[in-house]
Structure formats: structure tokens, C-alpha cells
Amino acid sequence: MRLFFTIIFIFLSLTSSLAQSIENERPKLVVGIIVDQMRYDYLTRFYNKYSDDGFKRLIRDGFSLENAHFNYIPTYTAPGHASVYTGTTPSNHGIISNNWYDKFAKKVIYCVDDANYTSVGTAQGGSKSPSRMMTTTISDELKMAQNQQGKVISLSIKDRSAVLPGGHTADGAYWFEGMNEGKFITSSYYREDLPKWVKDFNNSDKAEKYLNSPWNTLYNIKTYTESIDDNNIFEGLFIGKKTPTFPYDLSKLKKENGNFELLKAVPFGNSILTDFTKAAIIGEELGQDNITDFLAVSFSSTDYVGHQFGPDSKEIEDTYLRLDQDLASFFIFLDEKIGKDNYTLFLTADHAVVQVPAYLETVKVPAGYFDYREFVTYLDTITKKHFNLGASRLVENFSNYQLFLNREVLHDQKLNIKDVSEILANELVNHKSIYKTVTAYSLQNTNFDSGVLHRLQMGYNQKFSGDVLLIPNPSTISRDRTGTTHGSGYNYDTHVPIIFYGKGIKKGILKRNVSITDIAPTMSNLLKISFPNGTTGTVIYEALEE
């Protein structure tokens, strides 16, 4: 009996020591940074102009993955944030786009809208929750691993970029409400009132100061040799501006451009988020004990600027040079408040972006534009030819390059959905702007293990996706001829940075292909916690210290 109790005592002692060891190995704070619409080559193109303490610091002292890609379609903001934090693709986590057609409710829905909750800190814009995301996130798993101790705070300019990374158990998610508000808000999903530190920040004049600051280039514009001419026909215009050129007098432009909405669309949107992030660390007392906290930050202004001006513009170059300074300031702040050896950080993007197709055409790169009206007319001729039905009757919805067929019409006309889908797929591939087509039936019964159809399959969700899925030609987008967009499975949209930095991370570079879904299991392994419950990614073991 004495031997039995001795064994039990030793076992409990070892268990207690192991638990204490794991607790000591974990960082006090995990910081996840997503830069919206960041192409990998922004690291290399602008490298010589970056400061020593921003992007360069992460590359120099962290672990950089040079061949990281999104492994699914569509490459949009909401699926991107969900995939980074869940470690899986839309086929599992269910966030198949920013907006998508709900074939059960018969309407288009938004990824984080939730009428069960109300706005907090404003009259509207806050009825949001992560309820449509069907799997857990790394932030959820950390929270549960510590018996609901430790805080999870998620911040962004965009609502979806704050809500989804925070997961289902976040203590707070805050985003910027523009128009005439100019303040950070939240949803009653998280709490019934804004905390004091948020109110204090909103009552400061930071937003007003940034909105009345002129946007000129950080350095002499003549040194921005990585970009095309400032005045060109490929860039969009702010209302009230005749040319897409520096400087931008925001105080004069704000009235016609949505007042505080304009702040989102210039680099100062990133700057105010940086200020807000520092206030969150202080206000929530993050990283101040041995229970690990999680802070998710998503910089959105890079996406707004990128859409309007494109990746070859001087505006996007200046936005990244300014973001680099914001990051440098933030990293120094972390060193002072948390301690250099007390936090672990990763930086990535939610998608990349294609160069403006109109610009690509001028340099003889194949590119083009998808004409929605012309395509619907083409579709109509096909449906009438094969089924004697107009497209508006047979196709219930066409969005995100997916056709949702009308089940009631199919039933009434005694048409088999598999046969109809196959005919449409075979015909629509002949359209001038379409590269590939595939039916939902094929995606459910065939395993595509590589290429663009594999990525489409990883983004296909049987419950939510359409019946016929289309892939446009490379560098072909649905937009006017200024600015650009993203969403495809081509390299220009999938290739993004991933950099790990801080406690538990090696210094180094990895050139093999990795997927964005590998971030969550890698961080879970570092933290010694369960992987998010839908994870399909794998641990990037090369990045972790022994």
C-alpha cells in the first residue's frame, strides 16, 4: 500500500511539473497579424525601403516561408481569415465567401450578419457573430485549453476581419464604423457595453486628426521606382479628384467620400488600428501573467487601397511603406509592454491580388474582363436550346462564379439535376471568359489532388455551394477597367507571406510549398494545445525550436 501511494505521489508530481513546464514554455501573448490583400512580392519589391524594425525585423529574426499559398477557391477576405485561424478550408469551416446565396433562405447573406444580436457602441453595423463558421479556431482552442482563462481580443477595420479570427469564445471583437461615426464598435454577442478603454479611445480626436491629415508620399515620390507613373489610366478616383495622383487632401475629399469611410481607404486606417491595438493591450492587460492571451489584428486599408489603385501604383507602395512604420512602432511597443522573449507572432495575408488587367494588356500579358450581362445572355441561349427554358427560370442565382439551379422548376419540368448540370458545364466552358467548369456532382464524387480544380474542390461546401462552378481565365476579373480584385486560385491570388517570430520560433527561411492552413496547427503545436477541430493543415516543424 505504501508503494502504491508513493507511485501516485510521483505521478502527480510529474504531472504537476509537466503542466508547469508547458505553462512556462507558452508565450504570455500570441499575436496574429493578417495584412489584407498582401502579395508575397510586396516583401521583396519594397524591401530596400523598409525600416529595420518592421518587415525586415520579422524576416531577419523570424522564420519566413517564401512559397506559401492558399489552397482553395475563392480567395476572399472572409474565407481567408477563417482558414488562417481554423487550419482548414471552406469545405469544412463553411465560410465560402464574403457574401453568398443561401439556397435554403433563398437570399444573399453576409458572412457575419446575425440578427440575434444588436450593435454596441453605435445604432447600427454591429449585429454580427461568428455563428456561420462551423469549426473552432486556434483562439478557441487556446481558450478551452486554459479552462476559459486568458483573454482573446480581435481587432480590425472590417467587421468580418475582427469577428472570424476571434472565434466563438472571444472576449471581445472590435471594428471601425465609418460614415459619420468614426469609432470602434462591437456586437452584443461579446458584451452589452463598450469597455472604458474603447470609449476613451473613441472620445479622443485620433480619427478626426487622421481624417484631416494630407496623404502625401512618405518619401520623395521620385524614389518610388518600384511603381508605374503616378498619373495613369489604370487607377480609380476618389470622388472630387480629377487624377489618381498625390497629394490627397483628405479634409476636402471626406465629404463626398463617406466622411470617416475615407479613412479606411487610405494608409491612416492602418495607423489608427495600430493605435487602437496598443490601447487594447493596455486596457485589457494582455500578456501580463503566465496565462497566455491571444490578440488578433487585421490591417484592412491595404485592401481598400489595392482595389482602387492596383499593385503597381505609387499609392500601394506608399501604403506598405507606411504600414512598415506602423508595424515597427507596434513591435517596439510589444518589446516594452510584454517583453521580447514573452510573445509569439505570426504575420500573413488573407489573399493576394491580380495586377490590373487593363495594365497587363498593355504589356501583352493575357488578361481580360468578365462581362456579367453578356454571360447571362449566353447562358440564356444555352438553357433555351437544351431545355426550352430561359436562364432566369432555370437558374435561381448566379454569384461567386456559381450557378444555383431552381429545384422547383427542375421538378416541374421532370429534369434531372445531374444531367442539367453536366450539360451546362459542358456548354459554358466554351464561353470566351471561362477556363474550366465542374459540377457539384463531380466535386462530390471525384478527388482532384492538384491544380486549380483541387483548389476549387477545397473551397466547395456541399451544404452551401452551387450546382455548377466556373473558373474564369487567368487575369480575368469582373470589374471595370480601373483598379483590381481577387478571388481566383491562380498564383497571383494565392501566394502570400507567412512569417513566424518570437518565443519558440527559429530563425530561418523555408522554400518548400506550404498551405495557409498550416498556420493554425503549427501555432497549436507550439502552444501544446489541441488543433482546431476541423484542421486539415500540417505542422511546419522547421519553424519551431526543439
Image (cartoon, rainbow, N blue to C red):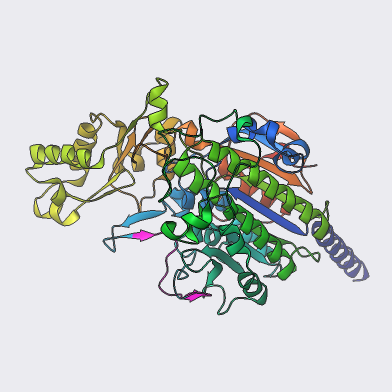
Predominant SS of the magenta segment: loop
- Would you say residue 350 sits in the magenta stretch? no
Which residue is situated farthest in the bottom direction here?
Answer: 192
Q: Is residue 140 visible?
A: no
Horizontally, is 502 left or right of 433 in the view?
right
Observer-nearest of 448 and 480 = 480
Number of numbered discs present?
0
**Quarter residue 364 falls in:** top left
The location of residue 184, given as percent across then percent down, is 56, 67
Work out whether 417 lies above or below 407: above
Work out whether 417 lies above or below 447: below
Q: Which residues are magenta?
A: 109-122
**Quarter residue 474 falls in:** top left
Observer-nearest of 281 and 271 = 271
Q: Is residue 425 visible?
A: yes
The residue positioned 67% from the left and 40% from the top of the image is 540
The location of residue 114, given as percent across then percent down, is 42, 69
Which quadrant would the N terminus be assigned to in this image? bottom right
The location of residue 233, given as percent across then percent down, is 40, 33
The residue positioned 57% from the left and 76% from the top of the image is 191
The location of residue 86, given as percent across then percent down, is 56, 53
Horizontally, is 363 left or right of 175 in the view?
left
The residue positioned 75% from the left and 34% from the top of the image is 508
Horizontally, is 514 left or right of 364 in the view?
right
Work out whether 337 lies above or below 401: below
Observer-nearest of 168 and 194 = 194
Which residue is situated farthest in the left direction here?
Answer: 388
Horizontally, is 516 left or right of 13 in the view?
left
Which quadrant would the C terminus be assigned to in this image? top right
